[in-house]
Image (spheres, rainbow, N blue to C red):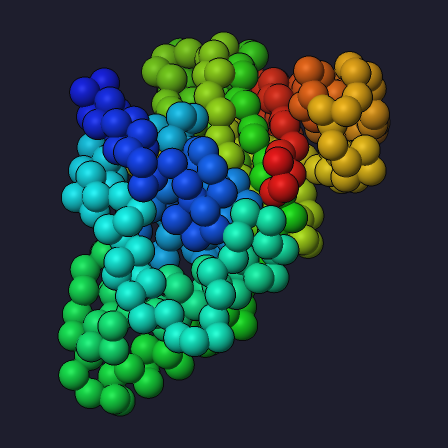
Amino acid sequence: MEHGRPASRKKLRDLLLKKENRCCADCNAPDPKWASANIGVFICLKCCGVHRSLGTHISKVLSVALDDWSEDEIDAMIEVGGNASANSIYEANIPEGVTKPGPDADHEQRSNFIRSKYEFQEFLKPSLRIISGKGSLESSSTKSAKDSFRSTSTERKEGMVEFIGLLKVKVIKGTNLAIRDIKSSDPYVILSLGQQTVQTSVVSSNLNPVWNEEYMLSVPEDYGQMKLKVFDHDTFSADDIMGEADIDLQSLITSAMAFGDAGMFGDMQIGKWLKSDDNALIEDSTVHITEGKVKQMMSLKLQNVESGELDLELEWIPLDQ
């Protein structure tokens, strides 16, 4: 991916600073820090969680400050023009009895409105529908076409997953990774949680790579373990695996939820994931409140490989932050 150049990022920041973009497009909460790159709106953290649950085929969520944006994504945001322009389409025909949620709306109110607005497209002018993922408008000339579209959307909703928070993962470094080329490897890391997958950059010819890259994942109610795999990038053949590890999120999430607003507490340890023969930990991994944030450092011994360790930092971000 070709990431946005400084001049393009400045255009994105300038767009965010426009008056109509200083509030969330979906609930009017002030100071939105997230965006749906393919829809073209700026949104708050609470609405961001609902957008993520729609899937990237409907809404691709990026942090304005933390995520890398491609030139195409920035250009698409600028082309839409921001919240007022997008809402003039997506909220053109809100029926009587439907109320747009406010900043303090509960999750159910917020979710119902956002799904109706973007997934079911219930508030468009009757003659329009939007092709998911492309942001282009089409005229629905027949009732059967509309019915077909609505039926497909309803089926997707039944399979949707509710999210309970966000997980920021910092991939810090690898140590003594396995050789997969002649004398070295070109490693990268893939993290998977539920249906979501993120990938680090490739570090060429390095068995002790340093990434220091941050990624954001939505955490579903039934979150299970996060899967980590390290691969060697090959140009002319399939990438070779360089080890893997399963990461138990329970100690982080249950501790964070038990304490609630971490900003009310001083720095302290609140939980621990214990090293055992059944996991990949090199040593016990503690959960701390640090400067009002819930974080967990861990060092992992990669499994099913001759050598290799990986250091991560996890941070829990509640949806109501």
- The N terminus lies in quadrant: top left
Relative to 137, 185 lies left or right? right
Check the image and report above or below for 124 versus 126: above
Q: Position of residue 27 (x, y in %)?
A: 48, 51
Q: Please give the name of the residue rendered at 61% of the width and 18% of the height, measured from the top-left corner.
A: 311
- Residue 73 appears in view: yes
Check the image and report above or below for 86 versus 243: below
Q: Please give the name of the residue rendered at 27% of the width and 43% of the height, measured from the top-left corner.
A: 82
Judge by depth and name the residue closer to the eye, 26 or 145: 26
Q: Position of residue 241 (x, y in %)?
A: 48, 33
Relative to 49, 231 lies left or right? left
Q: Please give the name of the residue rendered at 67% of the width and 23% of the height, measured from the top-left corner.
A: 293
Q: Please give the name of the residue rendered at 63% of the width and 41% of the height, measured from the top-left corner.
A: 320
Judge by depth and name the residue closer to the eye, 116 or 278: 116
Q: Position of residue 209 (x, y in %)?
A: 46, 13
- The C terminus lies in quadrant: top right
Judge by depth and name the residue closer to the eye, 116 or 54: 116
Tell me which corner region of the image, top left, top right, bottom left or bottom right, holds residue 14: top left
